[in-house]
Image (cartoon, rainbow, N blue to C red):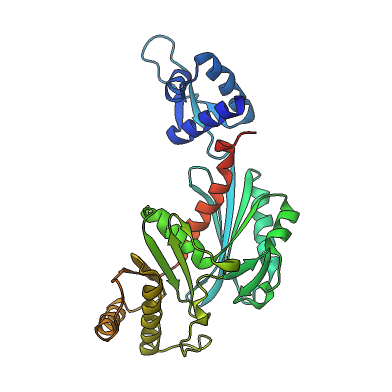
Amino acid sequence: MKQMNLNMIRRVMKQIGAGTKPQLANKTGLSVVTINSLVKHLVDSGELFEDKNQVSSGGRPALTYRFNYNYSLALVLHMVEEQGEDVIKASVVNLNEDILKQERYVYQEFNPSIVFQCIDRLLEQFESIKVIGVGIPGQSVDGVITVTSHKLLYGVRLTEQLESAYGLPVIVENDVNAAISGYAYRKQVSDDQCIVGIYFPEKYPPGMGTYLSGRVIKGKYGMAGEIKYLPIDVDWSKPLDVGAFNEAACRIMQSVNAVLAPDTIVIYKEQIDEEAFLNEWNSYLISHAIPTCPELVLEPSVARDYADGLKWLALNELEPKYTELS
């Protein structure tokens, strides 16, 4: 019962940021006596702290307590292609979703040791990191990365290696699955909507993520969205001219519509000519029927949604301490 009440205060304080004991009693329904004991516990643990900057309007002011959003931090890092460069981006995020630190690393040839070096550097600076989220251009099956555009990632047990090295929970997520999660979170997509994200890197094959009923659809072994296997005669290892790319993308979108009839399709591609692409799509629809016409969103960069998705997934990993009973 004590843990349940502590969780209730944590939830309220995380939401309101600051409050007095009477305010907490009012919002939680707990007695002032109970609040007194639990607040002391949370202050002693460092989750709450006393506000020293109080303004008195006469009489003795009620002591205000503030939630320590930096009590638990998430470290998220993801591999992404930006303007033809392979990049690892790393961020340290607090419980208020504030970014406390950001770093960017460019590499010529990927090696898993790069990930460990990034994590080591940031863990030295932030002792309160309690979860690690990693975004990869690939898919992990039973802990083993079996599909990836980086050859040196193939066969690596990344989750297992990171958890063993750092003793922290680790989340490893596919890049486009993380991106469409971030888009849905940013747009506050309702659970009854189907949102599809299609990511077209410059140097690697495309991938797709599907957000439906409030979650990403993974499929068997997490392989849903491996659209490079569609029966489309395209060599994704070679650069495509604008016309060839637009034709291939339209055929992919037609296939997606036939299977999923999504509300929205988000296209992630750098240096896309929005007007030319939309003209091609509208012309394509004249001679190719689809069951429904989705909203089409063109995003010139996957970076924002990718980072937001990983941040959301990692911070969710910290949420059980607010809801679970010991």
Classify the position of the C terminus by image quarter.
top right
Residue 225 position within the rendered picture, expressed as x and y whole percent measured from the top left = 50, 72
Image point 53% across, 64% down: which residue?
A: 218
Question: Could one spot residue 202 in this view of the protein?
Answer: yes
Identify the residue at image location x=71%, y=66%.
113
* Residue 296 vertical position relative to residue 56 in the rendered view, above or below: below
Q: Left of 58 or right of it: where is 316?
A: right
Quadrant of the drawing holding the N terminus: top right
x and y, in percent, of residue 50 in the image: 53, 24
Please say if 47 is above or below 64: below
Which of 56/72 is in front? 72
Residue 176, position as x, y percentages in the image: 49, 67
- Between 166 and 155, the residue placed more toward the observer is 155
Q: Give the number of callouts.
A: 0
Drawn side of residue 48 relative to residue 261, left or right? right
| Residue at the extreme right | 164
Residue 139 found in image quarter: bottom right
What residue is at 50 percent from the left and 52 percent from the top? 312
Q: Residue visible at 50% across and 64% down?
A: 177
- In the rendered structure, the answer to whether residue 263 lies left or right of residue 209 reads left
Along the horizontal axis of the image, is 325 left or right of 194?
right
At which x and y percent is residue 239?
47, 87
- Relative height, residue 30 to residue 180 (above, below): above
Q: Quadrant of residue 269?
A: bottom left
Q: Residue furthest top?
A: 59
Residue 304 visible within the image:
no
